Image (cartoon, grey):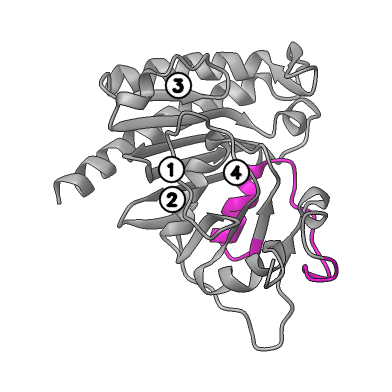
């Protein structure tokens, strides 16, 4: 009970911080913010990303000074690895969409305890959406509860399959059709929790900050993020980057991972 109460109080703090962050994001949105590139000029960063990161760190660690911190836009000094509870943050997930004036981006704030995601908030103000979830307390989109979903017998699965993942599958074994996923990985994964997608394959080099908040929503609705071997995603690892992952309902995991496994006898 104490852990659940702590999770709920932390979620309240995260919601307040996300509201402030969303306001900062909208103050720059479609107003030509400064932009530069990192990771060999592959990844854009805007001045809004940096402003939000600083404000979130001030608000969240100001309220929970004994927690760890992992953010896409902050240097990782490794101190988080010794902390039981860690905030895992992406100030703007979907920065390319954000600087292009499109609506499919969000502020992602996750909280993990001993490697397990326990609370998450996605604020997508341009879409007028607030996603939230807390361990044992369910998941919500704009205060509407998200629940387990099933697929009608014979209906085709609605799957997002990036080309790089399709190429890693055994020839002819993957889903025949796939849907576009959108620029924000966090919102793409959250769409599995809402039932808009049945499954999302996640390309290599995603990071904990892309996934932690949405992962809580999955777990609260009977879904999971797993690696190719079927192991649950764990957080606050020394390397926050991951290989191929799958977000889907628990009952679909064996079927959807099978094309990524070596042929029997190899």
Can residue 93 be seen in this snapshot? yes
Q: Are marks 1 and 4 in contact (CB under 8 Å)?
A: no
Give me the C-alpha separation between circle 2 and circle 3: 19 Å
- Secondary structure found at label 4: helix
Nearer the N terminus, badge 2 or badge 4? 4
Q: Quadrant of the C terminus?
A: bottom right
Residue on which disc 2 sits:
216
Per the rendering, the mark at residue 186 is 4
Look at the image and give the residue range highlighted in magenta: 171-199
Sequence-first disc among 1 and 3? 3
Whichever of labels 4 and 3 marks the residue nearer the N terminus, that label is 3
Q: Tag 4 or tag 1, which sits nearer the N-term?
A: 1
First of labels 2, 3 by sequence position: 3
**Hey, which residue is sitting farthest front in the picture?**
265
Q: Residues within 10 Å of mark 3 (few under 14, many from 20)?
A: many
Q: Main secondary structure of the magenta part?
A: loop
In this view, 200 is above or below 222: above
Q: Which residue is mark 3?
A: 56
Report the front residue among 212 and 263: 263
Q: Which element carries disc 1, helix, strand or loop?
A: strand
Pointer 2: residues within 10 angstroms few (<14), some, or many (20+)? Answer: many
Report how far apart the C-alphas of labels 4 and 3 lie in the structure.
18 Å
State left or right for residue 115 relative to residue 160: left
Residue bearing the label numbered 1? 120
Task: Tell me, yes or no, whether the two marked residues, 2 and 1, touch with CB atoms within 8 Å.
Answer: yes
């Amino acid at each position: 009970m104490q852990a659940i109460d702590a999770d709920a109080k932390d979620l309240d703090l995260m919601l307040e911080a996300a509201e402030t962050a969303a306001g900062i994001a909208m103050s720059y949105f479609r107003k030509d913010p400064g932009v530069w590139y990192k990771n060999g000029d592959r990844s854009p960063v805007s001045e809004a990303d940096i402003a939000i990161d600083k404000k979130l760190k001030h608000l969240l660690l100001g309220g929970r000074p004994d927690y760890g911190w992992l953010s896409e836009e902050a240097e990782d000094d490794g101190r988080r690895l010794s902390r039981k509870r860690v905030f895992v943050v992406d100030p703007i997930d979907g920065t390319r969409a954000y600087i292009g004036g499109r609506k499919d981006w969000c502020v992602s704030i996750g909280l993990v305890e001993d490697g397990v995601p326990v609370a998450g908030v996605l604020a997508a103000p341009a879409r007028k959406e607030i996603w939230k979830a807390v361990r044992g307390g369910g998941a919500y989109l704009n205060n509407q509860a998200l629940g387990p979903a099933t697929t009608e017998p014979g209906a085709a699965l609605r799957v997002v399959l990036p080309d790089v993942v399709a190429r890693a599958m055994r020839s002819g074994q993957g889903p025949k059709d796939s849907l576009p996923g959108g620029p924000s990985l966090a919102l793409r994964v959250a769409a599995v929790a809402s039932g808009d997608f049945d499954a999302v394959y996640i390309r290599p080099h995603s990071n904990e900050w892309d996934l932690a908040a949405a992962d809580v929503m999955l777990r609260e609705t009977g879904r999971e993020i797993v690696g190719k071997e079927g192991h649950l995603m764990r957080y606050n690892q020394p390397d926050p980057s991951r290989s191929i992952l799958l977000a889907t309902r628990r009952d679909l995991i064996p079927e959807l991972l099978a094309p990524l496994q070596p042929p029997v006898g190899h």
